[in-house]
Every structure is written in C-alpha cells, then in structure tokens.
Image: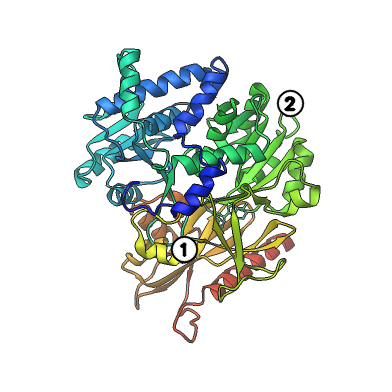
Amino acid sequence: MLSGCTPYPEDYAGRYRAKGYWQGLTIPEALARTIRAVPDKIALVEGDIRITYAELGTRVDRLACAFVRQGLAPRDRVVFQLPNSAGLPIVFLALLKAGVIPVMALPAHRATEISHFIDHSGATAYFIADVVRGFDYRDMAAALVPVCPSVKGVYVMGDPGRGQVDLRRLAEIDVEPGEMAAILAARRPDAGEVALMLLSGGTTAIPKMIPRTHDDYAYNFRESARVCGFHRDMVYLAVLPMAHNFTLACPGILGTFSVGGTVVVSPGTAPETVFPLIEREGVTLVSTAVPLVTAWLNSPLVGKHDFSRLKYLMNGGAKLVPELRKRVEERFGCIFMESFGTGEGLLCKTRPGDPEPIRLHSAGQPVSPDDEIRIVDAEGRDVRDGEAGELLARGPYTIRGYYNAPDANRQAFTEDGFYRMGDIVRRVDGYLYVEGRKKDLINRGGEKISCEEVENYILAHPAVQAVCVVAMPDDTYGEKGCAFVITEPGHRLDFEELKNFLIGRNIARFKLPERLELVEEFPISPAGKILRRELRAKIAAMVAAEKGCATAG
Ligand code: AMP
C-alpha cells in the first residue's frame, strides 16, 4: 500500500474479504462487469452526447494507455480538478486503470488550496478544464507549475495553454488491442491499493487527504446502490460536483455504473436547467443538497414539468428538515431519501421502504451490516440507546487514517481504529438522528468550511488582532460563516475590505465569511479558550432578532 497510509488490520481485512465485501477487484474491473453485461446501454448523457457502456470502456482503456505512455507511474498522485462533464468519469477511471491516484479537488478550489494539495500529495500532474464560468484554470496552472516542482504535466479538458497537454488528443492514441491489453495488464493495481484520495470536510487548518482503496470504495458504491434499490433501468441525474464523494460514489455515478443504469450530467443547478432535464431524460433519481432543494421547491416551475418518472430525491451533506422532506414528496411526487455520511467512510441512508416518520426525521441506518457504530459521552463511555453522544464509526469502508497525517490521526481515530465523526447523534431502533456536532466547522448547505482554516487567512490581515469564525443560521444554506474580529488598536475593518482581502488570498469563494462582527473581546473559558458556543449563540440571537424585525416590518 502507498506509504503514509494506514492499512486495515489483517484480521479485519480477512473478515471483509471472507464476507464478500471486498471482492479483490479494482474499481475499473468492478465496472467491466457492467460493460460486458450491457455493452449497448447508454452509460452517460451530456446534452446531445450519448456514450454506451462499450464506448465508455474503450475510451477509458485508450486514455489509460495514453497516461502510461505519458510517463504517469503507478501510485503517482495527481490533483484532479475537473468540472461536471461526461469526460470526468472517463478521465477518472482511466487514471485508476493506470494505477494513478487522483486527489479529488473541487472546481471551487483556488491556487492556495491547490498548491497545498500538490505539495502534500507530491502530485506529479494536475488535471483541469480550460475555462469554467469565466475562470481560466490554465492560467492558475501556469502560475502554480513554477512553484510546485513535483508537477511534471498539466492535462487540460478543452483547449490547452502553452506547454499543457490536450486530453482530447491523448484519447486519440493509436494502439493495437493486443498491445493495449498488455500495457493495462502490467499496470493493474492491487485491489488493496489506494485508488483515490478524497478531501476531508474537516476542522483543521489544512484539509486532510482521505485514501480510499479499490476494495473499500467499490464496496462503498456497490452496497449503497444495493440499499437504495438501484437497478439497470434507473437514470441518475448528476447535479452536485461529481468529484465529491456523495455524487461520485454514494451511490452516485459509480453506483449507477455498477448496476448498468444511465448517468445524466446536468450543466447547472437551477430549476430552469434541472427540471426540463428530469422530464426529457426520464430521470428516476436525483441526489442533491439543502440549498438546491429549497430553491427547487420554491421555483414557480414546480408542477410545470413531467416528473412522473422521478421516483427518488436523495439529500446529503447536511440535514434537510422534516417539513421540507415532506414537501419534496408532495410537490415532486417521489420518495425522499436522506443520506448522512462522510468521505472518511460511514454512510447511513433511509431506505425507500422505510415508513414515513423514519423518512422524514431520521438520518437512516448504516449501509453495511459490518458498520460498527459507537455513540459515546465526553468521557468516551457508550451512552444508552436513545441518548445523544458523539458518533464513532469503524467498518469495511471507513478509513483507519488520513494520508501522511500522524498528528491528525491521533486526534481523529481511537486506538482501536474508530473514526471520530464529530457529529452528535441519537440511535433509536437502529436509526440515527443527528442532533448537532462537536467539531468546529461550518456546514454551508453541505459544503464544509474549517473555522481554523478561515481564521488563519483572516489573521494575516494587518488590522486583525484576533478572530473567531463561527456558524450562523441561514434559511437557505442552513449555516453560513460569521467572523468575530478584534481589531488592532487604531485600525478599522469593514466587511467589504475583509472580503476583498480574502479573495486576494486565492481561496475557494464558498469559504468567505458572510458577515463580520467587530467586538472588543471574546468570551473566554476559565482555561483560557474562546467560548465559540457563546459566539454562535450571540450571532444566532442577532439573526433571529433581525428576522423578527423584518417580519414585523
Ligand atoms: P463530508 O465528509 O465532507 O461529506 O462531511 C461529512 C459531515 O457532513 C458529517 O460528519 C456531518 O457532519 C455532515 N453531514 C453529512 N450528511 C449529513 C446529513 N444528512 N445530516 C446531517 N449532517 C450531515
């Protein structure tokens, strides 16, 4: 296994194999079964582009060969930052087939985050699109290459910049079938090897990397597809970022491929785009997140499109309140499914056949019979069923450690390998209910923002003496970031100035705090720690009071 990763202990690995969870297949091999079973079925749709399973297989193989010829080596890490498109799964699977490990960045990440991903993973290549929504990724790559010496190549989906490689050209590689088979056989990674690295939606100053093996990730998407009732005739709409764990594999695109269904790529998230696509392509399941659900429910287009084939809407990343879950079922005429999980592993789902109170209120139950759940109090003792406590998880697809992060691992995992999720939950009759969380992050409609990370960016401003970033309630996103700042004596800071300063730090826009509160001091505990909880309560009270005024007015 790649060094810097924590393997599963042999007794656990043996059990997971014996039970058939880990099948000893690489992710591309797991999907090759589908390609053999339904070669002529449509695997991918984007606009007018329709790609059959057979074509998908051929394109992946050719590109994988091209990567080998380009000199990408087994276990090389590459930063993968592609926007949603039919090309994304092809490039992703080709890298896996060549034994190369993609680090799954999101399109929103900017130079500060990308350079960290490159440095921390030692990436030898960087995969981008040309221009997306006015942002030129080629320029960002050109500026990063001189300061990131490990990167030997920049691969572009679209028109490449100078010295960058055109992925379309690579896909035209001329290679004999026999030779191709030999090249790919020689590059087959072990199923216990790291297949990809996801990014943690964590709490530390720097996002950690989550190494997922072929065995565990294939189980992740296969098993979640099974419990969600995925089947060959389903049509999955990919709306959220496809490089994120939820859309990639919970069950997502890979889960859909595993059963021979069709993935439709949505070019946007607005009802004007999504609703006609659901009608035209006969979408049967869409996975989405809190802010989108709210926007879709409030759209005047609801009821103007034929949703008769839409059977399920799945929400993930942050809790959707029961009233909205009910409205989803009523307005869209489909079954609501809640997905509570993490890139580190554990996934819980409500099942299509669950009774209404469970569908509307719970976070579901774990997808694997071998997911081990503990709910513990502050001293680490198991609480009684029905009581709230911190959720710990261990199982056949939950990692045992982050990549090259021994200090973080000591904090995030118990000695016997349970991952500390940081969520406060209750368990009743096997179902989990999310009550809150212990960890310091902002969950902006599913997008996680580390308070510590943003505080560090803000601290670099010369007018800032001290800062504390906390979550504030928001009707659409659930939460947004609010920065409490103590300024240096004689300095001033306003929100616009802070915002422009942070944009200048080249970070993802979604991390920007959306409110600034200047204060004279922070509430401090007897041990000298900032009482974040009090600041959260303070901003929540302010937001509620303002809403009250607005309603009264
Ligand atoms: P990530 O690994 O970035 O997907 O973030 C995982 C975290 O997102 C979990 O530990 C929860 O805090 C939160 N989360 C994900 N799904 C849900 C959900 N359905 N309800 C409540 N919190 C959720």
Q: Seen in the image, is 438 located left or right of residue 27?
A: right
Q: According to the image, label 2 marks what residue?
A: 306
Using the image as rendered, state which of residue 279 and residue 271 is in the foreground.
279
Q: Position of residue 544 (x, y in %)?
A: 66, 66
**Mark closer to the observer (2, 1):** 1
Q: Disc 2 versus disc 1: distance between alpha carbons?
A: 47 Å
Check the image and report above or below for 512 versus 383: above
Q: Is residue 235 left or right of residue 177?
A: right
- Identify the amino acid type marked 1: Phe
Tags 2 and 1 touching, CB below 8 Å: no
- Total numbered labels placed on residues in the image: 2
Question: Which amino acid type is marked by label 2?
Answer: Asp
Q: Position of residue 62 (x, y in %)?
A: 36, 20
Residue 169 numbered tag: none
Above or below — where is 11 with respect to 137? below
User: Can you tell me which quadrant of the image ligand 1 is in?
Assistant: bottom right
- Is the CB of the residue bearing disc 2 within 8 angstroms of ligand 1? no
Mark 1 element type: loop
- How packed mark 2 is, by other alpha carbons closer than 10 Å (few <14, some 14-19, many 20 or more), is some
> Relative to 211, does residue 81 appear above or below in the rendering?
above
Mark number, residue 413: 1
Question: Nearest the camera: 75 or 461?
Answer: 75
Q: Nearer the viewer, residue 467 or 158?
A: 158
